[in-house]
Amino acid sequence: MEALLEVKDLKKHFPVSNHIPFKKSTQSVKAVDGVNFKVYPGETLGIVGESGCGKSTMARLVNQLIKPTSGEVNFKKKNLIEMDARTLRATRKKIQMIFQDPYASLDPRLKIGELIAEPLVIHNVGNKESRRERVEELLETVGLNKRYAARYPHEFSGGQRQRINIARALALHPELVICDEPVSALDVSVQAQVINLLKKLQKEFNLTYIFISHDLNVVRYMCDRIAVMYLGKIVEIGTYEEIYSNPRHPYTKALFSAIPKENPFEEKERIILKGQVPSPLNPPSGCSFHERCPFAVDICKTTVPKVVTPENTHQVSCHLIN
Amino acid sequence: MSEPILSVKDLQIEFKSGSIVTKAVNGVTFSLNENESLGIVGESGSGKSVTATSILRLIPNPPGKITGGEIIFKGKNLLTLSNREIREIRGNEISMIFQDPSTSLNPVFTVGNQIIESIRTHKAVSKKEARELAIKMLELVGIPAPEKRIDMYPHEFSGGMRQRVMIAIALSCDPKLLIADEPTTALDVTVQAQILNLMKELQAKLNMSIIMITHDLGVVWETCDKIIVMYAGRVVESGTVAELYKNSLHPYTWGLLDSQITESQNNLKPLATIPGSPPDLSFEVKGCPFVERCPYAQTVCFEKTPQLMEPTKGHAVACHFQTSDQKLERKEDAYFDGSTT
């Protein structure tokens, strides 16, 4: 199958000030450091990892909210990075984003109707009347009353606000929706409602999702394929069965073993990782995980592991495989 | 069984804003034994944090006010103590750790300063002794190179390390009761596992009781002996963790359990959800507070507020049916409606 999105060797290095005026900084934080993956039409790719591993930076790189240092982002075979501003803007209509914090992502001074119509106004779609109709249609799609268009964000709960965000993301008939921790700020029962809605909309409009989350249970439920990130790199990627039933990378194993118990009787074997994610300012040599890896051997300290493919679509970067 | 270390009886807390009075906590009753850990779970706004902060009398007044009930700690009613007396207990016999480790430390003092402050407030020790004790505390909570770390500022610590510092401060005076308000919500799963492990270890070592407030049932299964489920300012069910998981009785607890995503969850089937949202507590709630969202509701539920009763010893529930003879049958698909949106 043809990939909808193909990311090749994507890098984003943020320069860090050295506190010397007029001197160019030499150090940089390697937030995303050589990432490769594909997303196929109609699927959900989950991206998991601890805070600071570069998940959100990657989401912003994919729709060019920030410019990468190098690499390619090919959407339908066209590289977004080389596009001129006008084509990029037209292409971006097809790539929308849902953010984490439903309290920060809606302008408190705009009515819900105006908020949802904003993308339509920006891209010059339709006239006032047709936009109003589209807003009502969208509100109903996400399970809200169409009369809510005349209200302000503060009148809504977290779950309802997230529905409004979803309606706004769908306004321009996107093909790819990037969800950056869309349910992390919500209560369990509301979280389930929003997840169900996202699943339903995916079927209805044939959407492709990139789903970023640190909640491994949510990712397990939502995603067809999963990528595990550590310090700006993807350490393991594969289908949901491959990753959950047969994790190969020691970091993935540790991550899954840290999920809290499902019931009070479960006995879980834990791989408790020592220490914390090293600073991306000055990542360890060799495999960036070797300092915390319980299985590390000498080669891990010196050589960056290559990507190996133990099963068909399953890719791992670790010296210890095979 | 010995006398419980803490018992809360019929606690009532109101918040006043203009002429609107919100009853955030309405008749909460529970007790906690020595060396026991209790989980309080519920949605946002269910009153779990307010209940816990009221134990230390940290509710800002105004707007908040404890209007009724009693909190008995080691035989003393904390609500009738003078400010001086409660300060003796706060941070000394009962300590608290908060959700967000990045805002609960003061950025302009070193962590050592902040631990020493708490020690010197409650113990008559010299600065030097306090510093030594602070280093020991940092070591206890698993911070590497504590002699060096003690002179660092909070911004030089990661989220997990800051939460460890908070725990060190909280434990520096050997409290008998530790209240943890969502201690791991802001942390990553791997760090959460570290911190929960640490708390369990320290509990065994220091022989203290823990109240763990969380909205994550997984955290309760990990760490607690007993659990209370709160809804709209009331306790709807309480019991031991094992009992509640196996034989839960309240429809709200069923909904909470059902909407957890588990390993066996088929990802083609929609998730269970509890429809609607909790009632607005600034109006008087008539009948059972859960009635609007309950798939089992009947006429009586709209008219009478159910009281918390114990159908079996040690397992209490507030539901008209579960405490009478005509028990409800838990339907497997009660919280799966086709139109989940």
Image (cartoon, grey):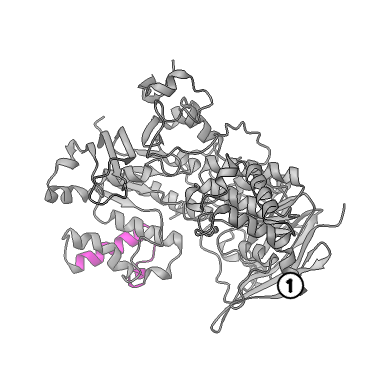
Q: Position of residue A281 (x, y in %)?
A: 37, 40
Q: Residue at x 43, y 18 (%)?
A: A299
Callout 1 secondary element = helix
Q: Residue at x 53, y 37 (%)?
A: A275
- Describe residue A179's horizontal placement relative to residue B331 as left or right: left
Image quadrant in which the C terminus of chain B is located: bottom left
Q: Residue furthest bottom?
A: B19
Q: Residue furthest right?
A: B1
Q: Main secondary structure of the magenta part?
A: helix
- Describe residue B105's horizontal placement relative to residue B140 as left or right: left
Which one is in front, B313 or B114? Answer: B114
Residue A218 position (above or below residue B47) = above
Magenta highlight range: A129-151
Q: Residue furthest top?
A: A322
Q: Position of residue A88 (x, y in %)?
A: 16, 48
Which one is in front, B61 or A200? Answer: B61
Per the image, the residue denoted by label 1 is: B84
Asked where in the image residue B195 lies, by quadrant, the reply is top right
- Describe residue B244's horizontal placement relative to residue A99 as left or right: right
The amino acid on which the numbered mark 1 sits, given as a three-letter code, is Arg
Q: Position of residue A148 (x, y in %)?
A: 36, 69
Q: Position of residue A216 (x, y in %)?
A: 49, 40
Total marks shown come to 1
Q: Residue at x 55, y 52 (%)?
A: B335
